[in-house]
Amino acid sequence: MSEIELRNVSKRFTGATAVKRANFTIRDGEFFILVGPSGCGKSTLLNMIVGLEDVSEGEIRIDGQRVNELDPKDRNMAMVFQSYALYPHMSVRDNIAFPLKLAKLSKPEIDRRVARAAQILELDAYLDRKPRALSGGQRQRVAMGRAIVREPSAFLLDEPLSNLDAKLRVQMRTEIARLHNRLGTTTVYVTHDQTEAMTLGDRIAVLRKGEVLQIGTPRALYERPRNLFVAGFIGSPAMNFLPARRAEGRLELPPGALEIPAHNAKQWGTAQGPLIAGFRPEHLRVIGERDVSGLCFAARAEVVEWLGADLFVYFDVALKGFGEMGLPDDLDIQRGDTARHTLVARIDPAHAVNEGDSVRVGLDWRDVQVFDAASGENLTLSNAVNEH
Amino acid sequence: MSRRGSAERRLGLLLCAPAVIAMLLVTAYPMLYALWLSLFRYDLRFPDERLFIGIDNYLSVLSSAVWWQAMFNTLVITVGSVSLELVLGFLFALVMHRTLIGRRWVRTSLLVPYGIITVVAAMSWRFAFDPTTGFVNGLLGLEGAWLTERWSAFFVIIQTEIWKTTPFMALLLLAGLTLVPEDLLHAARVDGANARQRFLRVTLPLMRPVIGVALLFRTLDAFRIFDTVFIQTRGAQGTDTVSLIGYNALITRLNLGLGSAVSVLIFVCVLAIALLYIKGFGIDLTRRREQ
C-alpha cells in the first residue's frame, strides 16, 4: 500500500514533450485512472511511475520517498501490460512464480502464494499449461496473477482489457473492481475507454497532449467538466454541443433562446467572443405541446436507436446564422457540418418515437454548460470550486 | 474428403511437382549414384578392374587411422569455430540491436568479412600469418611459423573461419533478438530481473529456436570445411579434415569407390548432426510461426 506523488513531472523525447508538468497525488488504496485519447502521454506517465522511463523533470515520490533514480525492480510495483507480456516458454505456474523466484522466496512460500493467486483468479486448472494454450481472458488473469503474488505496494495496469472482446471486457472489468476491493492496493489504471474509466475509477485524470486537464471523481467529471475536451470525452453518447451567443438575459442557440436568471448569467458574462453550449443527451426531454418551460423546439427524428432501457434519438439542428463551432479534433465527435449539427437525446423508451416522427424537445437552462469557444474553459464553473 | 477437397489436393501436388522433380534430379540422383559407386572397387586409373565389393570400402575407411585422425581434426575445427562464433556472434548481435546511432553503418561494416570469398579470406590470413610477409608476427612480436606446426595451424584455420562467418551468426541472432517482444523484457524488469537475469531467463529461452537454426547451419558448414584448410595447409602438419580425405581419394587418387564411401560417410555424419540439433533444440522446420 502506498501513496504516489507526482511533482511537476515532465517527459521530453527528442523534439517532443510527452508529459507536461503532471502534478497530483494518488492516494493510498485508491483506484486511479489515467484516461485520454491515444498519444496523450498516459502510458508514458505510467512507465515513469513504474520506472521504465526516466523522468525528464520533476519528482516522483512513493510514500514520501523520491524514487526517480530507482530501478523498476526496487520500486515494488507490479504491472500488467496490454499484451499481457506472459513468458511464452514458462507454464502458468512459472509465470506467476517468476517474480517470487527472483525475490528468492522459499519454495513453500512461493507455492503458497501461487496457489492463493490461482484460487483468487480461478486459474487452478491451468497452472501447468503454457500461455499459448489459454484464451485471451485466461491470459489476462495470469498477468493479473503475476502482479498480485508479489503483494506489491501498487498495481499499474496499462490498457489491460483492450485486447479482449466486448463481453469479456465487461466481465474482466468487474473482476478487476472486485480484486481491488478485496486487496485494497493502490492501483493506477491507464485506458482510452471512458466507460472503463467511469466504472472503475475512484478518481480519474483526463489527459490530452501530455497535459492533465482535470482530476476528479467520475461524477465530478461528468457533471462539472472543467473544459470542452473533458465534457466531450467523458460520457457516452458524448455531450451535445451547439454554438451559442450571449444576449440580454438570454443565451441564444440555433434552435432558440434560453432565458437565464440574471445572477447566473453574470457568471459567464466575462467572456467575450463566441460561446459553445453543452448539454447531456439525457437532458433533452421529449415534451408535450403545452410544456413551454426552458427552450422548446420541434425536430424531426432522423435516427432512433432502441437499447432496451434507453432510447437514443438523433436529430439535426440547422445552425442558421451561427458560425462553425471549433470543437477539438481529437474529441472525435464532429457531428454535422457548417449548416447543421446532429444532437442526440436519451429518452425513456416509453415514448414511442419512430424515425421520421416530429418531436417536441425541451431543454432546461440549469442543464446547460457554457464554454468559451476560444479557450474551451467551462464558464458555468468559473466561480465554482473544483473537486479534487 | 469432398470432391472439391481432392481436386484442390491434386492441384497442389501438381504445382509442387516441378520443384520435386528438380530436387530429385540435382540431389537425390547424385547421392544415390555416390552410394552405388561406394559399393564398388572402382579406380579410374584401372577402370577395367571394376568389381562389386559390398561394404568393403566402408570397412577400409573406418579401419584407417587417417580417417579417424581427420575426423578428430574436423571436430576440433568445428567445435572451436562454432562455439566461439556463437559467443562473438551474440556480442555483435547485442551491439547491433542496441546501437541507436549509425545503425546501418554498423550493420554493414560488420557484414564485410562475410561478403569476402572464402578462398580470398583464407589466402589473406595465410599471408598475414606468414613469418616473412605477414603482419601478425610483427604485431605480436613473435617469430613462429604458424602454419608449420599442428596446433598453431589449427589456430590459424579456426580464426579464419571465425573471422569470416561470425557476421553470419550475428545476423541470424540479431533477427532472433528483434523477435523478443520489448514488453516481455519490461515485464521482467518490473518483476525484479536484472540485466543478466533478463538475458538468461527471458531472451535466451525465447531465442532457442533461432540459436538452434544458427548453430545447425554453422555446424554443418564447419563440419564440411574444405577451402580454408586446402588453401592454408593442404592437410599438412596433421590438419587433414574429412572433406580433404574425400577430395584426395576422389580427385587426386581418382579412386571413385573409396572416395564415394568417404562422401557417403560425411553425409551420414551431417545427417546425424542435423537430427541431433533438431531433436535437441526442438527445431521444427515445418511449423509456421505462432502468433
Image (cartoon, helix red, strand yellow):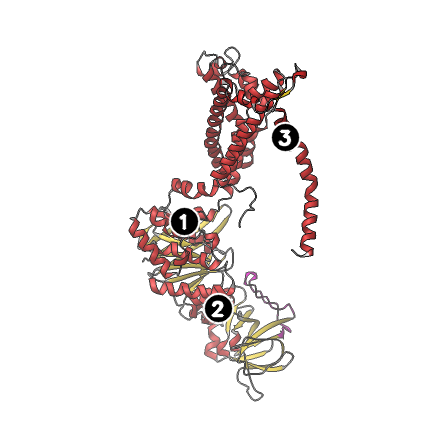
Disc 3 is placed on an element classified as: helix
Q: Nearer the viewer, residue A291 or B28?
A: B28
**From the viewer's perspective, is the residue at label 2 or at label 1 nearer?**
1
Locate residue B43, reporting x and y percent.
63, 17
For disc 2, the marked residue is A378
Relative to residue A97, is residue A324 depicted above or below?
below
Disc 2 is placed on an element classified as: loop
Whether callout 2 and callout 3 share a subunit is answered no
Disc 1 is placed on an element classified as: strand
- What residue span does the magenta drawing correspond to? A316-338
**How many numbered marks appear?**
3
Q: Nearer the viewer, residue B228 or A222?
A: B228
Q: Is residue B167 visible?
A: no
Chain letter of disc 3 in the image: B
Magenta stretch encompasses residue A325:
yes
- Look at label 1 and name its amino acid: Glu
Around disc 3, counting alpha carbons within 10 Å, would you say few (fewer than 14), some (14 to 19), or many (20 or more)? few
Relative to residue A348, is residue B81 depicted above or below?
above
- Look at label 2 and name its amino acid: Asn
Label annotation for residue B32: 3
Locate residue A255, reporting x and y percent.
60, 77
Magenta stretch encompasses residue A321:
yes
**Badges 1 and 3: C-beta atoms under 8 Å apart?**
no
